[in-house]
Image (tube, rainbow, N blue to C red):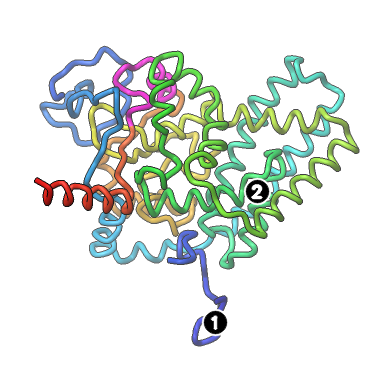
């Protein structure tokens, strides 16, 4: 499996991690949540692109997810895009540096009380940013974009996981690849909110709770929606993380581990970088656009995850080359609405009645669609 017919190594970084192969309605908000690069007379920068969505249900679509078809179209018109595909050697050095920084800070703060201002400031400003960077490093590694081989990518992901405090990296891979292959499919894409979340959190207080504890939703939701079958890599991830935590606590006490776990919480909470969780796939301004990009400066800290349309179109292109991809295909990416600010995404998500837990596009999974079609057919026959 690791060699081709000519016995040359397979470059798995080329597979993107999938080894198996109403207009005119004025809005008082400022700034506008999305940027239209080619405005028309009807779209004056503050108008909606479509009618408000029903807040009592998700947006159910019958169309396929847009990225596969767009990828095929781009490859036809720009075959040179394939030259951007492949692993990025720089990733492993950044991961080593950020892991070292977090371990150093955790040990340095071992004599500082966790409720002190300096501890909280470090955990939020430095630790939250660093651990968010590691979350997105694991995202990048999940697509096999740090090395050519599968095994070194998985080992690097487990190493990047150490300052996060809980075994996360290997579990994330399976769910995230499904998010790409089955985007929007109910009960398969665990990035989607559940009906229970829609019922309980579809109000201002609920959205504040959701935005504050995003990290817990992303960590716990998959276990309720679509459990993975555990394997040896999950076990290895768990054992290495447990040993690391034990050595850290037994040598330096509990406070270093408290710092790391607190950093992980802040990384997925009301943190500027965490706005990308909401920005990426929530529906904005009445548009049925399922993926939004962001081209601002926070991408420097986040492996260019803001280039999210580009990433979903070509998951085998690493973070350093996504801006080049956008520049290669301006007729596509410069015409798609994008977010001007991640922090403002969080603010607008909380205060805006027309964007909430409901503002996600869903599709029936193929199994559910087949069952529904069969049920409809039986009904027609009985009629």
| Highlighted range, magenta | 344-359
Between disc 1 and disc 2, the foreground one is 1
Q: Is residue 107 visible?
A: yes
Q: Is residue 242 left or right of residue 126?
A: right
How far from the left and from the top, in percent, is residue 78? 28, 62
Residue at 28% of width from left, 51% of height from top? 371
How far from the left and from the top, in percent, is residue 326? 34, 49
Q: Is residue 82 left or right of residue 318?
A: left
Residue at 54% of width from left, 22% of height from top? 212
How far from the left and from the top, in percent, is residue 109? 81, 27
Callout 2: SS:
helix
Q: Quadrant of residue 49?
A: top left
Q: Any magenta on residue 243?
A: no
Q: Quadrant of residue 203?
A: top left
Q: Within 10 Å of the Cα at label 2, are there few (<14), some (14-19), or many (20+) other Cα atoms?
A: many
| Residue closer to the observer: 282 or 77 | 282
Q: Is residue 331 visible?
A: no
Q: Is residue 204 left or right of residue 230?
A: left
């Amino acid at each position: 499996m690791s060699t081709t017919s000519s016995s040359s190594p397979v470059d798995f970084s080329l597979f993107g991690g999938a080894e198996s192969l109403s207009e005119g309605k004025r809005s008082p908000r400022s700034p506008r949540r999305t940027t239209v690069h080619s405005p028309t007379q009807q779209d004056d920068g503050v108008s909606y692109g479509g009618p408000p969505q029903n807040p009592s249900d998700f947006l159910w679509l019958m169309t396929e997810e847009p990225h596969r078809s767009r990828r095929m179209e781009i490859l036809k018109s720009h075959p040179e895009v394939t030259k951007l595909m492949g692993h990025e050697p720089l990733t492993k050095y950044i991961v080593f540096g950020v892991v070292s920084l977090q371990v150093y800070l955790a040990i340095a703060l071992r004599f500082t009380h966790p409720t002190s201002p300096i501890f909280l400031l470090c955990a939020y400003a430095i630790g939250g940013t660093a651990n968010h960077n590691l979350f997105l490093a694991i995202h990048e590694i999940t697509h096999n974009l740090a090395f050519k081989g599968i095994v070194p990518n998985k080992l690097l992901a487990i190493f990047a996981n150490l300052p996060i405090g809980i075994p996360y990296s290997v579990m994330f891979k399976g769910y995230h690849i499904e998010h790409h292959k089955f985007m929007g499919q109910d009960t398969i894409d665990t990035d989607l909110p559940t009906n229970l979340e829609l019922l309980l959190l579809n109000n201002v207080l609920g959205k504040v709770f959701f935005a504050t504890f995003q990290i817990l939703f992303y960590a716990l939701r998959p276990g309720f929606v679509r459990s993975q079958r555990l394997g040896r890599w999950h076990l290895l991830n768990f054992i290495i993380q447990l040993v690391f935590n034990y050595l850290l606590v037994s040598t330096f006490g509990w406070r270093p581990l408290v710092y790391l776990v607190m950093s992980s919480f802040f990384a997925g909470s009301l943190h500027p970088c965490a706005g990308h969780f909401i920005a990426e796939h929530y529906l904005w301004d009445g548009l049925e656009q399922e993926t939004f990009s962001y081209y601002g400066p926070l991408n420097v800290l986040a492996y260019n995850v803001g280039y999210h349309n580009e990433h979903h179109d070509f998951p085998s292109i690493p973070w350093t080359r996504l801006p080049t991809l956008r520049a290669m295909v301006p007729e596509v990416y410069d015409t798609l609405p994008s977010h001007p600010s991640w922090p403002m995404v969080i603010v607008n998500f909380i205060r805006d009645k027309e964007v909430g837990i409901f503002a996600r596009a869903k599709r029936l999974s193929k199994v559910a669609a087949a069952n529904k079609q069969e049920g409809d057919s039986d009904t027609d026959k009985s009629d």
